[in-house]
Image (cartoon, grey):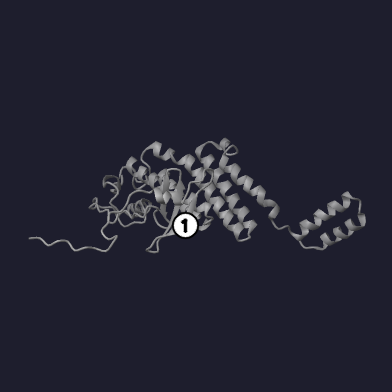
Amino acid sequence: MSEKPKPTDKGQNQPMNPDLTELLDAWKYEPGKINVRLIESSEGMSFVQVRLDLGILQMHLDGRPDGHRPQGFESFLEMVENWIEEAERGDIGPPPEFDLGEDESTGDAPLQPPRPSRDDPDDVPFKLNRDQCALLREEAIQYYHRYLALLALEDFERVIRDTTRNLRVLDTLSKYAEHDEDRDSVSHTKTHVTMMRARALASLAIRDNEPKAAVHAIEEGIEALRKHFENMGHGELFERSSEVQVLQGMKQALTPKLPVSQKAELRKRLDEAVEFENYRLAAILRDEINSMPD
């Protein structure tokens, strides 16, 4: 005869309520603004949350946004980069046993390392098939959602980290994708990620009261976009690019904040003195300018 179950404390072994109404009501969605916040779990883990019209998106603050570690790597990108290093060293042997480790969210077929082609010794070590390219793009979308949220939180260091990481994805696809459509998918995305990275670098410099460094970061971003359009064979699109216009507008807003050299300030005052026919002051300013070293 089986024993009667012992009573448990109130609340123990109770099924979790899947209804999110109370949670959503406590954080109302506000149209027209980015609804984002940082939270800390009871275990001390940090998350960034985005309130959407139909729910809440929660992402890990560091590592892969969904917290998965495919085959022990931080992300699929790190896994693929490891394949590339092995292929370039000639270390890729027979396909390994498939092991997702902590990640049980995906099938095994797309995650097997591709075999290097020996037909062309000057070719890249291997090509990424459609499934592998799709996994890299889908993973990059997670980082995209996170860096938009982090930008709203003004966590510029992590925005730089995630945008730099997504640029690595795009470069990997451009170089190693087997099919043209996967390589072509890089084009538009790269302009946006490049612009966002430049914005974050400039915003970080502004916060540190370094307007010259901010302008330099913007100029580097604009030049990277120029090269991108030229490499695409569409240099005429550069000036019409909305991403370029955003960076140029940011640069124009920063220019008045740049420190002016003493000599440039004296020249400005000299021009004003001549304009108002204050020739005595103009002569003094001219002598002072001439006495300064170049």
Q: How many marks?
A: 1
Q: Nearer the viewer, residue 118 or 187?
A: 187
Is 115 located above or below residue 267 in the figure? Answer: above
Q: Quadrant of the N terminus?
A: bottom left
Is 7 located above or below residue 88 in the figure? Answer: below
Q: Is residue 283 left or right of residue 205?
A: right
How many other residues sit within 10 Å of disc 1, few (<14), some (14-19) or many (≥20)? Answer: some
Instruction: Estimate the x, y position of residue 135 in percent, counting from the top left.
Output: 35, 45
Q: Is residue 5 left or right of residue 29?
A: left
- Can residue 154 be seen by looking at this rendering? yes
Q: Check disc 1 and report its element: helix, strand or loop.
A: strand
**Quarter of the figure with residue 241:** top right
Q: Nearer the viewer, residue 203 or 239?
A: 203
Instruction: Estimate the x, y position of residue 98 in percent, counting from the top left.
Output: 24, 51
**Quarter of the figure with residue 173:** top left
Which residue has dot 1 on it?
Answer: 38
Instruction: Estimate the x, y position of residue 73 in percent, counting from the top left.
Output: 34, 56
* Residue in the picture at 27% in, 46% down: 107
